[in-house]
Image: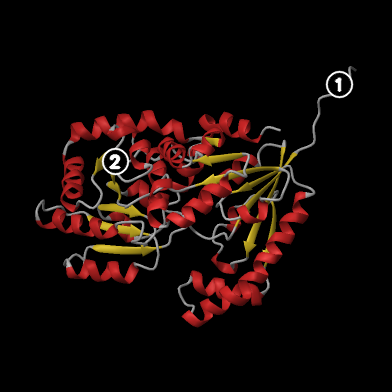
Amino acid sequence: MLHEQPTTDWQPPLRIVFLMSRFLDGGIDTVLTEYLKHLAQDDRFQLTLAIATAMGHLEVYAREVPKCVNVVYFSRSKVLTYIPQRRALKQASPLAKAFDELVINPVRRYKARKAIEKLAATTDIFIDFDCCAYSFLRPIHVKKIAFFHFSFAQSMQQNARRMQRIGRELEHYDRVVTISKAMKAEGIRLFPRLKAKLDVIYNAKDPVLIQRKAAQIPTDERLERPFILAVERLEESQKDLTTLLRAYAMLREKFGREEWLYIIGKGKSEAELRQTAHELGIDDRTVFLGFCANPYPWILQSRLLVHSAKFEGLPTVLVEGLLLNKLMVATDCPTGPREILDDGKAGLLVPVGNAESLAKAVNRLLSDAHLQAEILEGVHRRAADFTFQTVDHQLKKLLER
């Protein structure tokens, strides 16, 4: 029997540490779980997920992290995590917040700094996935990659001083990953010194897994109604569900649409949005479904997926809509929707904050069978661009030694 000769080019697994300030239920968290699932299938990588502050039962996606991924926390005692958990639930008093910032947070930061210094001895690459560890990573002499998930221009508009500081800190990373071409262009315009470091990698999804989850239809009579669906955080500083509610009122009154409006998500603007729905007289047909760990059956069963925001990075729900072959209407905000929907070929785009345009676009797409066929053809063409099969080469090149 012939025996295989030992190869001389064998290399030990690349030791990669993903850094997160906390691990909750947002878009960045779901994207991270997709990366971990994908990379965990490759024995060339040894993965660690390092979370600065343990959030207990609020870590709803923790069960989706592959078992082979080593998960570590920098701060997990009740003393260090109680107020952050209360803040995440919007249940911390102003006094508690001030005490946490002045007394407890310096301790958490010290522990994070020491933990990262210790990890560096056994790490080949740090990936700062929510771009919050730059001050801890600056003195670390291993490969460092940052993922930036938001519009540079919008972030600059919101807080110029903070964004200028982040721009300077990003210069200390080996690579900076943006999640759309438009975002990269913003980065080059605002921070020219980052030009050689900037990459674009779309937030990819596993279409087989999404379709499998979409088939797990819960027993819920609300799924049997005709409905339009929005899936987004109820946070009006970034999102714009107020415009969607006004558009839905027009759809009911002006166009006589019978579809219900379902909204999946949670956030601090929920009470305000419920009040708006009541004032518009649509609260009897508007359903706030709250957080949903598996929104895919709802997306699949919807008549149309709608997304209304003031600014984005690369809205994950529109990518999921592509992979589930859905009709979509989105506001043309910076950045992401136009790029995902292929300049309107894979979904209709409307001006930000224009309820009438949004209502007309939704009604048109629900009413015009020829337009539906055109859009779904565009959806089919575009969907493959947001799968790991397409982005895998870029990802592996980013991680190469």
Residue position for label 1: 4
Which quadrant is home to the N terminus? top right
Q: In this view, does 220 lie above or below 202?
A: below
Residue nearer the viewer, 15 or 228: 15
Left or right of 15? Residue 246 is left
Residue nearer the viewer, 10 or 60: 10
Name the residue rendered at 58%, 43% in the picture.
171
Residue 309 placement (x, y as % from top left): 32, 52
Name the residue rendered at 23%, 59% in the picture.
245
* Callout 1 secondary element: loop
Residue 182 placement (x, y as % from top left): 40, 37
Which quadrant is home to the C terminus? top right
Name the residue rendered at 51%, 42% in the picture.
209
**Pointers 1 and 2 in contact (CB under 8 A)?**
no
Residue 220, by quadrant, is bottom left
Residue 107, by quadrant, is bottom right
Q: Badge 2: how crowded within 10 Å, few (<14), some, or many (20+)?
A: many
Whether residue 215 is visible, yes or no, is no
User: CA gap, disc 1 to disc 2?
Assistant: 53 Å
Amino acid type shown at disc 1: Glu
Residue position for label 2: 327
Residue 248 placement (x, y as % from top left): 20, 56
